[in-house]
Image: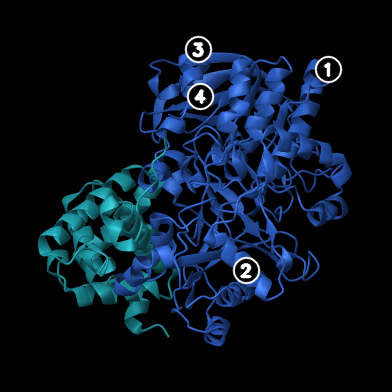
């Protein structure tokens, strides 16, 4: 069952997506986008990132940078769609009512971010599930494409070819 | 040291032009202009060039060769795949793996090489009137391409990911077979999907395209075919847009190509897109319609011993059992195979996040994955998808998953879990957002029966895009004839997976090679008046 809040969120998201991202355009390397990724990545990748605080911060920075590089390699149309998504996450009103995150990203608690990811993951609105999947795909690729992730998962890296 | 003979050839004088480096508009004249360098375009290029025709090849992606293939997903996906391997259907429900460098998808595919199944050919003859599509008539063309590309059943032992499919299936009385692969001197590394670093894979990049270049062909890279001009009967010229050095953004420069004949081989999303942008006659609105994907669902097993699915030939065992348990146009059939299990591919496909996701990733070496490829296009409720254009002219595929297809997806998830438990799995996780790791088949069966089957809930991927320029003899339901000739533009032919009127029901590369070889030889004879020489 869809809760009332999910339904409202879905409607706003759909409206925002249909309206286009022009109002929320910002550069792919925008400071706010980095803050959003830096807030979500430790939750999405909890259990995968190192626990030591300094190493963890470095790993989050790697994910942020890896995502920037990946986004820069996408076709313009896809980049525009991601701009819309990050616009929704950045704009306080949509962050609050579409993502359900009350606090600004750097202050958002892990529980709040987990609830946000879960509500989009199982949303009745396919576009929100798609938005969750986009975050999932980009952040998973940014971390697991990084050699620093490989030891923990028993992957020795590519073989040496002579 | 692996010899990078493609790079040597370019340095030795093959005519390869990277359009991101041009600083003014240009013109190129040729006998035949071929858009796309994958299975169809590559095969056609060698045949036409060896028939004495001046060929120009147009490739949207870059030229990358064995030296560049460093077996790192982070580098390979942006360089070698459409949309960094994140191409998706319009509703984002299906991720599509398609190549985008010289050699097209053949540069990055997993080497599985099957002739077009005989029941598919029978369906095409009976339903679509493709009279020449019988096994006996096509056999010499498949045989020629098997010789050309060293296609043989894999001789070495399958890796543990593949042998689990074989052993689990055998325990249930389900037959499986060894996959024929297009490799010569394969070192069994397992990195086919990131470009073969040893040039063992007999992709178009290392076979037909070098042969065409040695015969004087011209190769344009980072070159996007924009549109044909058309005078009502014939195509006059092709406008090619140079891309910038990032390989993505269009530059201000164009190259105009004038040729006697044009070949479209840009794949089942790219070829319809060029036709749509060109506004060629399409009175029955068929271009880009009936596009098929072999939608794939996946199941992950955690095995008691290491599987190391990132190592060894990625695909060597398959089962067609569930293609044959019912008529081809009844409930949807599916082919069982396994994929390579590399970190990025696994992590992005694996459902869930946080600790549950991380715990399964920590067991990556113990992960065994089966995939089921659903045979779409043979039933009224499996009419496929349609290609349309974005505002900037780039294509997007809309592919609705119908209840008919979902029913097969659910059956396939059940089958795969049962095989994995039979193979000794400790736990099985069907790739569905509602799934958890199940420790017995009855538990998995009960859960799978209740999964809501909808997009972005059930993980669905595809590596086989087919259809959209269907061949046939009735202009009311086809875009090209049996030889790939366009019904309305007399100097245009299509050679790629877009010509299939349904999905193939098998990994399509050898179907594209064999049918393109036949049709390109037919075209060569039309253009030169002489029989085309065999290429192997």
- Label 4 to label 1, Cα distance in Å? 30 Å
Indicate the position of residue B493 as horizontal and vertical percent values.
72, 31
Relative depth, front residue between B420 and A64: B420
Tell me the element at label 4.
Answer: helix
At a point 44% along the width and 78% down the height, the residue shown is: B437
Q: Which residue is mark 2?
A: B167
Label 1: chain?
A: B
Indicate the position of residue A16 as horizontal and vertical percent values.
34, 62
* Mark number, residue B13: 3
Tell me the element at label 2.
Answer: helix
Label 2: chain?
A: B
Indicate the position of residue A130 as horizontal and vertical percent values.
41, 64
Q: Which-is-in-front pick, marks 2 and 3? A: 2
* Mark number, residue B6: 4
* Horizontal side of residue B108 vs B78, given as left or right: right
At a point 44% along the width and 51% down the height, the residue shown is: B86
């Amino acid at each position: 069952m869809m809760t009332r809040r999910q339904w409202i969120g879905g409607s706003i998201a759909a409206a925002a997506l249909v309206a286009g991202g022009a109002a929320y355009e910002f550069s792919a390397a925008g400071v706010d986008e980095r803050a959003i990724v830096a807030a979500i990545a430790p939750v999405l990748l909890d259990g995968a990132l190192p626990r030591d605080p300094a190493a963890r911060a470095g790993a989050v920075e790697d994910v942020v940078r890896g995502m920037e590089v990946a986004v820069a390699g996408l076709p313009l149309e896809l980049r525009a769609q991601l701009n819309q998504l990050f616009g929704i996450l950045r704009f306080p009103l949509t962050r609050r009512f579409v993502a359900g995150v009350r606090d600004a990203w750097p202050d958002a608690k892990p529980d709040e971010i987990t609830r946000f990811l879960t509500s989009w993951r199982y949303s009745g609105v396919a576009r929100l599930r798609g938005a969750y999947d986009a975050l999932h795909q980009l952040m998973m690729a940014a971390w697991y494409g990084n050699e620093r992730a490989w030891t923990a998962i028993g992957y020795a890296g590519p073989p040496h070819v002579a | 040291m692996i010899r990078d003979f493609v790079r040597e050839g370019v340095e030795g004088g093959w005519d390869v032009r990277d359009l991101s480096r041009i600083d003014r508009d240009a013109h190129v004249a040729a006998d035949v202009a071929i858009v796309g360098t994958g299975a169809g375009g590559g095969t056609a290029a060698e045949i036409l060039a060896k028939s004495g025709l001046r060929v120009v090849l147009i490739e949207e992606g870059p030229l990358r060769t064995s030296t560049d293939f460093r077996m790192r997903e982070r580098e390979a996906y942006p360089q070698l795949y459409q949309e960094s391997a994140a191409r998706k259907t319009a509703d984002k429900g299906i991720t599509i793996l398609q190549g985008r460098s010289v050699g097209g998808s053949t540069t990055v595919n997993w080497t599985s090489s099957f002739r077009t199944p005989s029941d598919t050919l029978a369906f095409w003859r009976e339903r679509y009137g493709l009279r020449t599509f019988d096994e006996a008539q096509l056999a010499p063309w498949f045989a020629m391409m098997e010789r050309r590309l060293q296609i043989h059943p894999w001789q070495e032992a399958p890796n543990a990911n593949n042998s689990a499919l074989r052993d689990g299936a055998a325990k249930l009385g389900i037959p499986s077979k060894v996959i024929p692969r297009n490799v010569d001197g394969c070192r069994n590394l397992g990195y086919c999907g990131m470009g073969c670093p040893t040039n063992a894979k007999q992709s178009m990049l290392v076979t037909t395209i070098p042969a065409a270049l040695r015969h004087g062909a011209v190769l344009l890279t980072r070159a996007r075919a924009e549109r044909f001009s058309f005078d009502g009967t014939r195509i006059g010229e092709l406008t090619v847009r140079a891309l910038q050095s990032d390989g993505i953004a269009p530059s201000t420069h164009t190259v105009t190509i004038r040729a006697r004949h044009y070949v479209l081989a840009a794949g089942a999303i790219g070829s319809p897109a060029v036709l749509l942008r060109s506004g060629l006659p399409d009175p029955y609105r068929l271009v880009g319609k009936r596009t098929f994907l072999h939608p794939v669902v996946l199941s992950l097993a955690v095995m008691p011993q290491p599987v190391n699915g990132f190592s060894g030939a990625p695909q060597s065992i398959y089962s067609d059992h569930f293609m044959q348990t019912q008529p081809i146009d009844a409930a949807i059939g599916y082919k069982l195979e396994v994929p390579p299990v590399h970190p990025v591919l696994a992590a992005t496909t694996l459902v869930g996040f946080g600790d549950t996701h991380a715990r399964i990733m920590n067991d990556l070496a113990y992960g065994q994955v089966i995939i089921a490829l659903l045979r779409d296009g043979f039933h009224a409720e499996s009419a496929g998808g349609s290609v349309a254009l974005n505002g900037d002219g780039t294509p997007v595929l809309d592919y609705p998953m119908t209840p008919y297809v979902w029913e097969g997806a659910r059956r396939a998830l059940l089958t795969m879990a049962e095989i994995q438990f039979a193979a000794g799995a400790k736990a099985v996780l069907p790739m569905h957002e509602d799934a958890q790791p199940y420790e017995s088949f009855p538990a998995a069966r009960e859960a799978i029966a209740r999964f809501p089957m909808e997009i972005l809930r059930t993980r669905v991927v595809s590596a086989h895009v087919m259809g959209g320029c269907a061949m046939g003899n009735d202009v009311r339901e086809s875009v090209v004839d049996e030889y790939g000739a366009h019904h309305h533009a007399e100097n245009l032919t299509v050679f790629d997976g877009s010509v299939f009127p349904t999905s193939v029901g098998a990994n399509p590369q050898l179907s594209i090679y064999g049918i393109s070889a036949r049709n390109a030889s037919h075209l060569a004879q039309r253009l030169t008046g002489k029989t085309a020489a065999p290429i192997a």
